[in-house]
Amino acid sequence: MQNQPADNLFEYYSNYPCTARQLYDWHSRFGALERLLPPWEKTIIVSRQGGIDPGGRVVLKMRTGLIPFHYHAHHIENIPGKMFRDIQEKGPFSSWSHSHFFTDTVTGCKLYDKVEYSLPFGNYLPNFLQNYVHRSLQQVFHHRENIISEDIKVHLRCSSKPLRILVSGASGVLGRELIPFLTTGGHQVWTLVRRTPDSSKNEIFWDPENNILDSSQLPEIDAVIHLAGEYIGLYRWSEEKKQRVIDSRVNGTTLISRLISSLEVKPKVFLCASAVGYYGNTGHKGLKECHPQGNDFISEVCGRWEAAAQAAIDAKIRTVFLRLGVGLTPRGGALERILQTSPFGFMRRLGSGNQYLSWISTDDMISAMLHCLACTSLSGPVNIAAPEPVTNREFMRTLARVARRPLLAPIPASLLKIVYGQMASEIILSGCHVSTRKLEESGFQFRHPNLELALKKLLGKDVINRPLSLNMENCSE
C-alpha cells in the first residue's frame, strides 16, 4: 500500500555516540516503540504484529486534546543497518510516511528522520495549524533524541555483553519502563506472571502465596531483578491490606532467593527492590545506607523485605537492595495521580509542606538498575534517588511552574489523616532526605539531577534550541 503524495515535509537530524548499526539495532528490538512514546502523551499500544520488517503493523490509541483516535502503522521497507520506513494505513492524516536513515560519522553516527505527510483539508487550514503540527513533531523528535542518546550511553557503559535477566513485577509501573529499556539494549528478559504464561513472550508462572515457582522452567540466567509487591500507597490501610503488603514482599522475596540459591548455575547478581521508607519519617538529612531502620509500618515492611533475601546472600550471590525513592513518570504512580486529580492547579502543600521527598525520574531509576547489575563493587543497600531531594512545598511549587498551573490552598494534615489514616501519616506527610553518595561514587551518572529539569523532560516542557525544520512545498518524489 502506497500513500498519496504528501504536501508537507518534516526533517530531523540527530547524532549519537555509537555506530549506525548499533543505532539501527536499538530501533529494531522489542521495546523501542515503548521507549520512544512521549510520557506526557496518553498513547497506548493496542496491538502489534511483527517488527520493523516489511509487513509489521502497530495500532496505537492516541489523543489530540480530548479527542481520542487510533493510528494504524504499516512497515513497508527495511534495509538492515541502513534504513526503514513505515506509513499510516489508517489514522488522522490524509497520508503519512516516516523514513529513518542511519549513517556513520567520524565521531559516531547520524539519524535522519524524514516525515512526509498531508493533512485533511490541508489547502484550507490556516498556517498556524500547519506550524502547530511541525512544532508538535519537533517536540516528539526532540524527546526521542534525548531518550535514545541517554539510553545508548548507559548501555555502552554498563553492557559489555548481553545478559539473561529474570524480572518479577513486570506489569507494574516500574516494570513496564524497565523491560523495554533492557530489551532495546540487547538483553534477554524472562518475566514471572501469575496467570497462564505465554512461553513465546518468555513468561514463567509463579504463585508466591503458595510457594510455587518451578526451577525447571527457568533458563540459565545471569541476573534477577525482583520488583513485585502489593501497591502500598493509594487508599486508607486496613489491617488486611497491611498484611497483604507484608506477605507480598516477604513471600515473593523468600521464594525467589531460595530458588536461585539452589540452582546449579546461580545468577551472579540479585537486585531486590526496597524503598527509602526503610528509614522512616526522620528530620535527618543525607541519610546513608548505614542509617538505622525506622520504627513505623513502612520501615518494618522494608526491613522484613530485605531480610527475606538472606538465602541469596548465604549462597554468595551478589545481592543489592534497591532502596527506591519516589519514581516520577506521568505514566503511573504519584506524579500521574497528582496530574489527574489537579486539572485546575496544585495544592500549595500537603500538611506543613516541610517533609522531604527523595524523588527520582523513572529513566534514572531504570538506568541505576542496569548500573547496579554491571557494577560488581555494589552490594547491600543502595539509595536509588536523585541527588537533590526537595520538600513537599518545593515540589508543588516547581510542578506548578513547569506545568503552568496555579497554586491552590494547602491541604491541612488533619484532613489528610481523617481521610487516609495511617497511610497519610507514613506516606503523604512523612519525609525522608537520603544521600546518593554510594551510587554516585560507584560511577553512576544522572540524566535528571534536579527536579525542574526532570519535570520539564517528563511533561514535554523543555526548550528546544534548534530552528524549526519544515518545508511547506510538495515533497512527493
Image: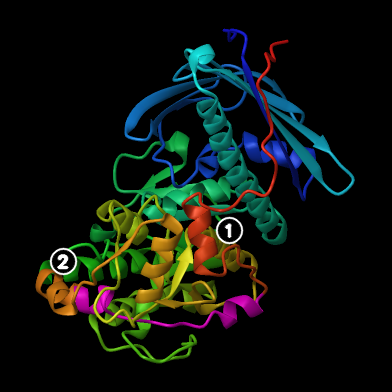
Any magenta on residue 39? no
- Work out whether residue 270 can be spotted: yes
Label of residue 241 in the image? 2
On screen, residue 9 above or below 463: above
> From the viewer's perspective, is residue 34 above or below residue 158?
above
**Horizontal relation, residue 468 to residue 428: left or right:** right
Q: Nearer the viewer, residue 280 or 307?
A: 280
Numbered range of the magenta stretch:
424-442
Seen from the viewer's position, the closer of residues 134 and 395 is 134
Instruction: Tell me the tag on residue 214.
Output: none
User: Residue at label 1?
Assistant: 222
Q: Label 1 amino acid?
A: Asp
Evaluate if marks 1 and 2 touch, with contact meaning CB atoms under 8 Å apart: no
Q: Quadrant of the N terminus?
A: top right
Say few, some or many: other residues with alpha carbon within 10 Å of mark 1 (under 14 / 14 to 19 / 20 or more).
Answer: some
> Between 231 and 147, which is closer to the camera in this rendering?
147
Left or right of residue 82: residue 116:
left
Q: Locate residue 50, reporting x and y percent.
A: 53, 25
**Screen quadrant of the C terminus:** top right
Q: Nearer the viewer, mark 1 or mark 2?
A: 2
Furthest-right residue in view? 106
The quadrant holding residue 59 is top left
- Residue 82: give x, y in percent of width and height: 77, 28
Q: Earlier in the sequence, mark 1 or mark 2?
A: 1
Name the secondary structure under disc 1.
Answer: loop
Residue 430 among magenta residues: yes
The residue depicted at 27 percent of the width and 61 percent of the height is: 231
Residue drawn at point x = 24 percent, y = 60 percent: 209
Q: Give me the residue at 58% from left, 82% from top.
A: 437
